């Protein structure tokens, strides 16, 4: 009977010790980390350049539409009916092309942002994984998901930044 009690105690000792060990959970402010990554700044610059090109083209289309509209309005009374119909059709076509271009530009911007942000996200995730393994953390949670984080909670943000060389 004594042997059974000793055996049970020996088996239960590691379980009890593990239960007493604090759970290692940390949080990271991923938005802060990403905002400080050089790749993010490059992505933002690329997106701004692309948007400026799209805006320039859209302005050119708008200027063309405005010019043709003002010409049409100025000559409207002196034009015969078939020319009026053709010019109205041209104006509608220009307006439709501008709307299509605007939709296409927004779609291209979204695609570009997704394409450029994928490597940034992968690099961040790898750094978080590495920090978790190196510091024996069970979880690293994104701090934006919580309404409250205790001041005694482990902040892995500096460790992740260090891992990324930021």
Image (cartoon, rainbow, N blue to C red):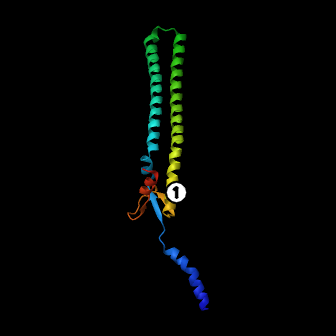
Q: Is residue 15 above or below residue 6?
A: above
Q: Secondary structure at mark 1?
A: helix
Q: x and y percent of residue 17 in the render?
A: 51, 76
User: Could you say which quadrant of the image residue 93 lies in?
Assistant: top right
Residue 126 image point, x, y percent: 52, 53
Horizontal and vertical percent position of residue 115: 54, 41
Between 120 and 75, the one lying in front of the other is: 120
Residue at 55% from the left image edge and 11% from the top image edge: 82
**Front-most of residues 97 and 124:** 124
Q: Is residue 50 above or below residue 26?
A: above
Residue at x 45%, y 33% (from the top left corner): 49
Residue located at (45% from left, 48% from top): 34
For the residue pair 43 and 63, the one nearer the viewer reads as: 43
- Residue for point 46% across, 14% down: 72
**Mark 1 packing: few (<14 Cα in 10 Å), some, or many (20+)?**
some
Relative to the observer, which residue lies in front, 44 or 67? 44
Query: To which residue does mark 1 refer?
Result: 129
């Amino acid at each position: 009977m004594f042997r059974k009690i000793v055996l049970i105690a020996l088996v239960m000792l590691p379980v009890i010790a593990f239960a007493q060990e604090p759970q290692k959970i940390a949080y990271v402010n991923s938005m802060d980390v990403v905002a400080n990554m050089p790749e993010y700044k490059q992505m933002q610059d690329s997106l701004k350049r692309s948007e400026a090109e799209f805006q320039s083209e859209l302005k050119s289309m708008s200027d063309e539409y405005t010019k043709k509209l003002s010409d049409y309005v100025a000559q409207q009374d002196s034009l015969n009916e078939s020319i009026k119909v053709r010019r109205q059709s041209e104006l509608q076509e220009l307006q439709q092309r501008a709307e299509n271009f605007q939709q296409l530009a927004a779609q291209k911007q979204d695609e570009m942002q997704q394409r450029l942000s994928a490597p940034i996200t992968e690099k961040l995730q790898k750094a978080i994984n590495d920090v978790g393994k190196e510091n024996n953390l069970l979880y690293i949670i994104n701090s934006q998901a919580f309404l409250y984080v205790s001041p005694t909670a482990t902040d892995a943000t500096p460790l992740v930044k260090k891992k990324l060389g930021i």
